[in-house]
Each structure stands twice: as structure tokens, then as C-alpha cells.
Image (cartoon, rainbow, N blue to C red):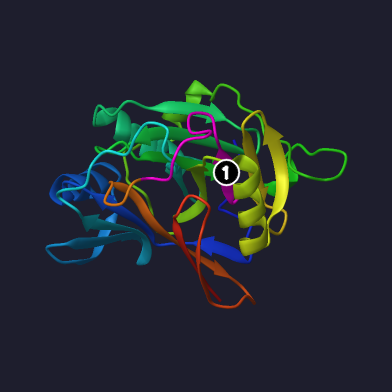
Amino acid sequence: MNDTTRSFHTGLSFGPLCLDVADLPRASAFYTGVLGLDVLAATSDETLLGAGGEPLITLRARPDAGVPPPRAAGLFHVAFLVPTRTDLSAALRRLVGAGVPVGSADHRVSEAIYISDPEGNGIEIYRDRPADEWPRRADGRPRIATLALDPDILGVATREAGLPPGTIIGHVHLKMNDLDEAVGFYRHALGLDVIARLPGATFLGADGYHHHVGLNTWQSAGGDPPPAGARGLAGLTARRAGGAHADLVDPAGLPLQISP
């Protein structure tokens, strides 16, 4: 078992990601009590959550927020990258112990588990394999797959634990209405390369990473941007080393703030 700490670093990082939620106390209780994030700051209208002092998620109270239509663009999942395989195992044990339904996959470059928060926002928790173990295409790009996760991972950790210090947002995966338009926008805005294409989906990464942004139209092709006032993803912050500050809006109407 390779349990090395995260060794792949890039000039692109994310956070905090902003979610509008209809029930702030319930959402906050899930992210702290189930995922094990820390409250970094809180008011009656907003909670900032993180791990090891790193801000990861802002929850904003929007009591009147409606559920977006099924084909609306928005968040597919936010992906929390933990430092080691033991951390992933401990998080999985915690989720199973809490009775949370969990999906899983081995992507060859990473191992991942999938859940949803109480308002239906998708969450991935994953650990990267060392980059020198990633299968690669002839041109050197990482080769991503979706295989069954080794069930023995549950026994790697000896305890249940939440998301540890060193956890970051490793990537974001978005539902879009027009895939080509979205790919063009994120390639230009964040300086990303196309790493892999699947029917209805494209994965983009910077600096050789397997992906920083996933985009799909599996359930949202030809749909609409999320209506004003809907719950869900409200904004994304990206930090790009050597880049310039920019406030942009993606093709689905999502605010994207870029800072050096």
C-alpha cells in the first residue's frame, strides 16, 4: 500500500467555494459533524468552513432559495483532496458510521468516494496516487478510468476521522448546458489543457495534473442556467500563480474570481 502524502503540486488552487443553502444550520451541521470540517468564521447568515485553517467552503443562508430545475447548469461535485490513503479510509469509515450513502471509484490516478450533502450538492473525497504511478497516453497525458474501488480500503485506517489538515479542493466538476462553450471558457480563463474526453464530458488540468475542472452535459445539455435565487453553487474562487486578478462569469452564469 502506498500511503505517501500528496506530492503533486500545481500553480492552480481553488477555494473557498460558495454554496447557497436553504437551511444553514442543517448544512453546517453536516459539513462539521459528518465531514469533520472546522468552522473558521460564522454569522447568522454565513458559515466559513475549512481544514487545518485552510478555507474551503462558504455556506450562505438563503431560506427562500428554490431547488434548481433538473437540467440546469451548476455543481456536479466539489472534490476534497486528502493527503493520504489512510485519510481517505478514515473519512470513509466516518461516513459509513454516520449512515451516509456512499459511492466509490478507482480512477487509476486516484481513489475516490462520493456522497451528497443534505441539499443535494455532490461531494467527492479522494486521494491521488503518486504521479509516477499514473497510467499515461502516448503523448504523456494522464489516462483516467472508472473502475471498482478496492473494498479493502475500509480497513486501511483504524479509526473514523473527518477531513484532516492538508485537505484542499483538488478539483471542481460542473454541469454545463453547452460543453464546447464551457471548455473554451475554462481553458482560456484558467490556462488549462484538455486531459481527457468522454461522451458528454471533458476533463481539464494545469501543469500536468489529471484534472482541475471537470465539465459535463450528461443531464444538462441544452438546459438553462440556474435561475436567480436558486440554491447550489453561487461562486468559485481560483488562485493562479503568476496570473492577474479577474472577475468573470462562466457560460452558465457562475461567478469565477481569479486571483494571483
Identify the residue position indicated by label 1 in the image. 214
Q: Can you tell which quarter of the image residue 15 is in? A: bottom left
The structure residue drawn at horizontal position 48% and vertical position 29%, both measured from the top left corner, is: 219
Spot occupied by residue 96 in the image (x, y as percentages of width and height): 31, 28
Q: Tell me the element at label 1.
A: strand
164 with respect to 249 (left or right): left
Q: Which residue appears at 75% of the width and 36% of the height?
A: 135
Q: Position of residue 124 (x, y in %)?
A: 44, 40
Q: Tell me which residue sits at (49%, 44%) in the image.
A: 174
Q: In this image, 68 relative to 77: left or right?
A: left
Majority secondary structure of the magenta segment? loop
Magenta segment: 211-226
The residue lying toward the viewer, choosing from 100 and 219, is 219
- Identify which amino acid the numbered label 1 is placed on: Gly
Q: In this view, does 240 lie to the left or right of 136?
A: left
Q: Which quarter of the figure has residue 26?
A: top left
Q: In this view, does 66 lie to the left or right of 123?
A: left
Residue 25 in view (yes/no): yes
- 127 or 190: nearer the viewer: 190
Location of the N terminus by quadrant is top right
- Give x and y (percent) for residue 57: 34, 57
Verify whether residue 223 appears in magenta: yes
Farthest residue in the right direction? 138
| Looking at the image, residue 158 lies above or below residue 168 | above
Residue 211 appears in the picture as rendered: no
Q: Quadrant of the C terminus?
A: bottom right
